[in-house]
């Protein structure tokens, strides 16, 4: 049975109760934890729960820890995939059954309030950077968290949806339709209807490993 997503938003002095619960588990509230909660809540609504959903992050952080806690609420044995490697996203969700993916790239600091304060895809906006901007505006941690969770995620994240399905290793070894290379080391996937290699798809190889 799919879990119903409930989002209760913050008031001027408190944080959302479910974010508070995660902060207790994390032994502290941080801006990165709040960022992970915002991303996870958006994905929960998009997928109508996180059953059969895998999550990957490009770095270990409180945001990744938050997503790991959310994932284990659905499957206690679930494993969050993390790596210190540049990808075309900061957070990635993939539904194992439908093949739908949802990626998030933090494209601007939510506390900069400058439309031109953008970054290259894959260059994570760190918590120290967010804290500096928040402190310059005179916000306390609680006030900064409330701003972060109240601001539409699309204002500081690029969100993309694609479909990525495995291709049997017995299928004809076609060249990648993006880079043109034949690859025996990296199997191809069907990405938005195109046959491309894992490298171009930006997907964790372990999610599509054939035994």
Image: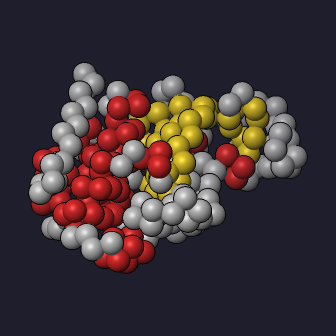
Relative side of 195 to 10, left or right: right
Q: Residue at x 25, y 69 (%)?
A: 139
Q: Position of residue 175 (x, y in %)?
A: 85, 41
Relative to 132, residue 43 above or below: above
In which quadrant is the N terminus drawn? Answer: top left
Say which of 143 and 62 sits in front.
Answer: 143
Q: Position of residue 91 (x, y in %)?
A: 47, 52
Q: Quadrant of residue 43?
A: top left
Q: Residue at x 61, y 59 (%)?
A: 121
In which quadrant is the C terminus drawn? Answer: top right
Q: Quadrant of residue 122?
A: bottom right
Residue 67 visible in rendering: no
Q: Position of residue 47 (x, y in %)?
A: 40, 30
Say which of 173 and 35 sits in front.
Answer: 35
Relative side of 174 to 78, left or right: right
| Marker count (numbered) | 0
Q: Residue at x 42, y 47 (%)?
A: 153
């Amino acid at each position: 049975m799919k879990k119903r997503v409930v989002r209760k938003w913050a008031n001027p002095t408190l944080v959302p109760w479910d974010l508070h619960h995660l902060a207790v588990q994390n032994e502290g509230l941080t801006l990165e934890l709040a960022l992970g909660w915002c991303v996870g809540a958006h994905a929960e609504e998009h997928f109508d729960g996180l059953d059969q959903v895998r999550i990957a992050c490009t770095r270990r952080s409180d945001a990744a820890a938050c997503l790991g806690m959310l994932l284990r609420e659905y499957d206690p044995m679930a494993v969050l995939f993390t790596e210190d490697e540049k990808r075309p996203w900061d957070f990635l969700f993939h539904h194992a059954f439908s093949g739908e993916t949802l990626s998030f790239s933090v494209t601007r600091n939510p506390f900069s309030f400058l439309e031109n304060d953008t970054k290259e895809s894959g260059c994570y906006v760190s918590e120290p950077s967010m804290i500096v901007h928040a402190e310059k505006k005179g916000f306390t941690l609680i006030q900064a968290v409330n701003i972060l969770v109240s601001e539409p995620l699309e204002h500081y994240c690029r969100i993309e949806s694609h479909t990525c399905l495995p291709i049997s290793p017995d299928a004809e070894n076609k060249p990648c339709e993006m880079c043109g290379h034949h690859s025996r080391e990296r199997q191809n996937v069907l990405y938005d209807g195109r046959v491309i290699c894992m490298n171009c798809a930006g997907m964790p190889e372990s999610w599509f490993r054939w035994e």
